[in-house]
Each structure stands twice: as structure tokens, then as C-alpha cells.
Amino acid sequence: MTQETGGFAAFNLNPNILAAVIATGYEEPSAIQHQSIPIIMAGHDMIGQAQTGTGKTAAFALPILHRIDPAKREPQALILAPTRELALQVATAFETYAKQMPGVTVVAVYGGAPMGPQLKAIRNGAQIVVATPGRLCDHLRRDEKVLSTVNHLVLDEADEMLKLGFMDDLEVIFKALPPTRQTVLFSATLPQSIRAIAERHLRDPQHVKIQTKTQTVTAIEQAHLLVHADQKTSAVLSLLEVEDFDALIMFVRTKQATLDLASALEAKGYKAAALNGDIAQNQRERVIESLKDGRLDIVVATDVAARGLDVPRITHVFNVDMPYDPESYVHRIGRTGRAGREGRALLLVTPRERRMLQVIERVTGQKVAEVRLPDAQAVLDARIKKLTNSLSPLVADAESTHGDLLDRLTADIGCTPRALAAALLRKATNAQALTLAAIEKERPLVPNNAPRGDRPERTGDRPDRGDRERRAPVPLAEGRARCRTALGARDGIAAKNLLGAILNEGGLAREAIGRIQVRDSFSLVELPEDGLERLLTKLKDTRVAGKQLKLRRYRED
Ligand code: ADP
Ligand code: MG
């Protein structure tokens, strides 16, 4: 038994279940699991009140698996869930926890799929049936005895089921089950309608209530930003400019991404570190300590590595990669807003992930507002604000300590105090861009993974001819062709306009488009050689900023 699962070991679950929980990587039972598992294992009826993401599935699945008899090939437990998605999630969770219990099978029963195979799976001896109420009633109409062997019933998300109008179906299902069964009801809220059900259908239920999650989620301001996958790093860097954070955790999906993003942040001068499953325990603890005491401000983590991380200084969570499910989203953003403080959670969403955003909004019952990348003005304002904040406390006594020196230096150099102060500012800010024009210039037009020092061209005023002569042409990636349009910066074109037009009208994946260079009087775009002629035909009538794009293959020589 590993020490991390000591918490789960204490329940005395069937060892095969415990082994599966260990394999899943759970370390400690969540609060609802801690309280519910013993009650359900003991066979009591129970009412559990807890928010999304608190781990309710395992809270009932583990003790129910413990109580069923794998040797009996008949339905023994019925779990009702409001939607097909949730039913599938619960069924998958059961399968995970039952992985090491030979002979245990789970069937999911929901609408929109043929009934025959579902009924067959039940009759073939699935012990666990996870169902939406509507579809289950359809089955009952065909075979009213199908549930007669069930002796454990779980109503998961009972309030949602009532909201979806399943009240009558529930009554039909209750009637079809043996009255001696154990009944467990989970719900985020306990309105009168739920209490009435409990009153009628539960026997002497024990109550378990977990409140913390609600508070956590409501104290967090959530927003999302639409980006293309390869623009995430630059989006993160822009956001950091304007977000007023204390400590921040960023979530990504892979170990490599923790390393890449952490080093990109370090390169920009942030105190950042990666946290992933490969990092040794003592190093991991050092990282967390550093985040706590301010030696680090940003940790880039995978879900696994961040598990249990609790640092009150964290004001922001950036979901740089989409979480796999809404529950882990709730877990992630719960890293901020600790101890009743306000927190802010930002989610980067690529076009293909918009559906997941909707699922998150539905499951958490909260709208995740859209934000846009800060524009140059916002970045400038934020930089000046930071500078003001860092300088203003120094002004008070600086004149008494360094005033005379200033007089002497201006005399020695023969410059005005304004000139000297300006020079000192430039030095103190490491020549950071602090005018609108300078910031606009420094922002990459196509923030893709252009190698360092080889930024995409800026909207400059340099004559394009001379520019081309001075530079060796950038080698093309294999399979790409360079195309040219006569539209350029002077036509009000930015790289993102070109990108948008080509993506929309050309029907290409973002990855298919390479570098985009906007010059004053023309622009160059790298497109896939394969199918180029067809693509150019497709784009024949495309307009950008009101003008015809007229994209043509471009030859250097
Ligand atoms: P709820 O039903 O309360 O919304 P879930 O049961 O779906 O929550 O669990 C949310 C997430 O937390 C899931 O991804 C699940 O695998 C994970 N989880 C549950 N219990 C634990 C635990 N003890 N340790 C770590 N992760 C857990
Ligand atoms: Mg659930």
C-alpha cells in the first residue's frame, strides 16, 4: 500500500477496487468521498449535497462496487443521471474503478442510441446500469421486470433531473425497483421538490453536505479568449502584461508544454518554473515553496503535477490548454480564490474547442465571458502603471540622497535634468517599449512559432524593394509555396486579416498556413503547395479590408 492512498485504504474497500483507485492516481479521498463512502458501504440511505467537481462519482461508485456481487450476472445497481454525457461519464468512471474486478460489467442506457443492444447488455448480466430516466422508462415499458434485481439506486444530480422534467419518469422507476433497495441521492441544491422525493422514497437517510466548492467557484471571475493553437504563447505573454496578478498557475496538457512555456516566460523576465510528473518530489516541493514565498510568480503545470497544490498567493489561473472535462476545469480554477479571496481564471479556447467551452458553462452553470487580447494602448497603459507604481515610492527620499549627485552629473555631462532622467528611465526599463508606436512595432504580426530573431515582418515604412535586397530570402518549409498579394500595410492590412480571410474562405487548417509577411505595398503568405492552384481559384474573389486579395504564386528570382 503506498502512503498516498492511506486515505483510501482506511475505507477497507475490496482490494481490487482500492488497487484500481491507486492506478487512477487518486491520492486522498475528497471531502464528499470521505464522508459518503462509509455510509454507503454500511448500506444506509443517504442524501449528499455537493457541487460539481467534488468527486461525487467515486463517492458512490466505490462503495457500490464494494457491495455488489460480481458472481451474480444481473443488474444490481442503477445510477440515474440527467443527460447522456453525464451517464456516459459515470459509466466510464465505474469501468475505471471496476477494472480489476473480473466479471463486473457496466451498461450505459440513454436516448439517441438503439434500444436493442442496451437491453441485451442488461439481460446479459451487467451488474451496473447507468441510465437517463427517459430512456430507462422506455425499457421498462418493454420489460417491467428489467430492474427487479436492483438493490442499490443512485440519483446523481437529482436537481438537474427535476429541472429537465424527469419527475414522472422517476416515479415510474421507483415503482419498478424492490422497496428494500438502498437509495442514495446526490444533488447540488436541495429544493422542496427534492426533499419531497427523499421523504417518500428514502428510508431514514443520513445527510452529508459539502459547501466549499460553491464559494470557491463564485469568488472566481472567469473569462475566455479565442486563439489559434500556435498563438498561445504570445497570447499568454500579452495577457500577462495587463493582468494584475500576484502568483499565477498555468495549466497545459503535456510535460513538454510545461517546459516550453516556462522557458518562454523566463526569457521574458518572469519568475517561472515548470511542474510536471517527471519532476522529483523534493524538487516539486521546492517549486511550491518558492511560489508560496514569492521567489517564483508563475508555475506551469500539468493537472497531475498540480494536484493538491494549495497556495493562497495564487490570484490567477490560466488554462492555456483546455482541460479534459468540466470537472477538471473546476478543479483547476479552484486553485485560485482561496481563503475567500477573489480569483481570476482565463481559458484559452481554440476554434475547435468551442464546444467544450459550452459544456463547461453548462456544467458549472456560469457564463465564461469572452475577452480579447489587449491592444497596444492597453499594454502601454499597463506598462506605465507598473513603472509608476515601482517609482513612486522611491521619489520621497531620493532627492535627499541623490539630488546633489544629479546636479553634479547634469553639470559634468552638460545636459538637462530631463535628458538625464530620460536616460535613467531607459536604462531602468531595459529599453522596454514605452510608446504606442514602439509597442505596435514590437508585437509580432503573426505570433506563430517563428524562430527567435526571425520575427515576421513589421508594418514598417521601409521601401520594400531595398528590404528584400538586404535580406537573404527565408527558406521555405518543404511542401509550401510562397504567394503574394499587392495588398500591404498601406492598405490597412494586418497579418491577422490575411490569415482570417484565407482560413475562412480557403477552408484550410491553421497549421497549413505558414509565415505571413506584411510589407508596405505587398504581403507574402506561405501556403501548402499541394492543392495550391485550387486554393488560389477558391480565393479568387476574396476581399480583405474591402480590396481584392488577388493572391498569386510568387517567385523570388
Ligand atoms: P462531481 O460528480 O462531484 O462533479 P466527479 O466525480 O466527476 O465530480 O469528479 C471530478 C474529477 O475529480 C474527476 O476527474 C475525477 O476523476 C477526479 N477525482 C475524483 N475523486 C478524486 C480524488 N480523490 N483524487 C483526485 N481526483 C479525483
Ligand atoms: Mg457528477
Image: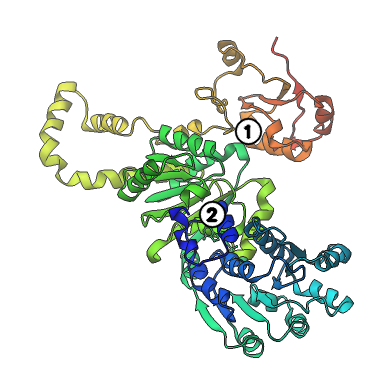
Please, is residue 426 above or below residue 43 in the view?
above
Please, is residue 499 above or below residue 27 in the view?
above
In the image, residue 240 lies at what x, y percent? 45, 44
Question: Quarter of the image holding residue 51?
Answer: bottom right
Quadrant of the picture in which ligand 2 is shown: bottom right
**Disc assigned to residue 495:** 1
Between 411 and 42, the one nearer to me in the picture: 42
Question: Quarter of the image holding residue 89?
Answer: bottom right
Sort mark 2 into few (<14), some (14-19) or many (20+) by Cα contacts within 10 Å.
some
Task: Give SS at disc 1.
Answer: helix
Residue 308 visible, this orientation: no
Sort mark 1 into few (<14), some (14-19) or many (20+) by Cα contacts within 10 Å.
many
Residue 111 is left or right of residue 337, and the answer is right
In the image, residue 472 lies at what x, y percent? 59, 12
Q: Which residue is outermost to the front?
A: 71
Residue mark closest to the camera, 2 vs 1: 2
Q: Tell me how far mark 2 sits from mark 1, CA to CA.
A: 50 Å
Between 321 and 89, the one nearer to me in the picture: 89
The residue shown at (36%, 47%) is 291
In the image, residue 404 lies at what x, y percent? 10, 33
Q: Amino acid at mark 2?
A: Ile
Residue 203 is left or right of residue 406, and the answer is right
Where is mark 2, residue-wise?
22
